[in-house]
Amino acid sequence: MRTISVEFEDVAQEDQYAVGRVKWFDNSKGYGFVICADFDSEILLHQNTLRNFRTETVVEGSYIEFLYQTSGKGLRVSEVLSIENINASGKEVKTDEQLEVCPEVFPARVKWYDPTKGFGFVNCFAMTEDIFIGADALKSAGFTAVSAGQALCVRIARTASGKRVYQICDWSTE
């Protein structure tokens, strides 16, 4: 009988802090990469790490504050601390701290929602304007889509471009 000896390298280490930009992220692959001025190599960003931050994806070019670890395969993001999203036109998407969120909840009906576009509009009771609803609000509430005419209970935020659904609330608790 032959005995095999295996030695394991101690991989336990403290997370290090960094700030960078998302180089790219592919939902179908479940990962992407972050670049930082302080590093020559890219830092792996896995979708599971984003899920721990309560999001599934991140937009290319977004600023990201994170903790990272070094492994045998290189650097990887171990925890996301904040994300400052940039939209397709390169403009900053306001984060929660920058939004003016109304503390009240409103009854609303879905006017239309297109899951391929990832957005639509709702009409709130006693309001004349259409209110934007994005896929981010749906995902946060556990929805994959909504249908025209569907009743929702929503909290609204004011942004530079108008009002948007910030949160979909449970009817029974609000």
Image: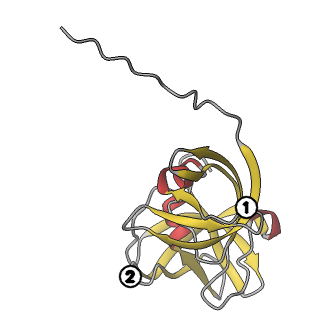
**85 or 41: nearer the viewer:** 41
Name the residue rendered at 76%, 56% in the picture.
Answer: 18
Of callouts 2 and 1, the N-terminal one: 1
Report x, y in % for residue 172. Answer: 53, 47
User: Residue under circle 2?
Assistant: 116
**166 or 31: nearer the viewer:** 31
Name the residue rendered at 81%, 63% in the picture.
Answer: 97
Q: Nearer the viewer, mark 2 or mark 1?
A: 2
User: Residue under circle 1?
Assistant: 104
Residue 17, placed above or below residue 22: above
Which residue ends up furthest to the left in the rendered image? 1
Label 1 neighbour load within 10 Å: few <14, some 14-19, many 20+: few
- Kindly check if marks 2 and 1 are in contact, taking CB atoms under 8 A apart as contact: no
Residue 39, placed above or below residue 157: above
Residue 71 in view of the camera: yes
Name the residue rendered at 60%, 87% in the picture.
Answer: 88
Report x, y in % for residue 144. Answer: 39, 64
**148 or 92: nearer the viewer:** 92
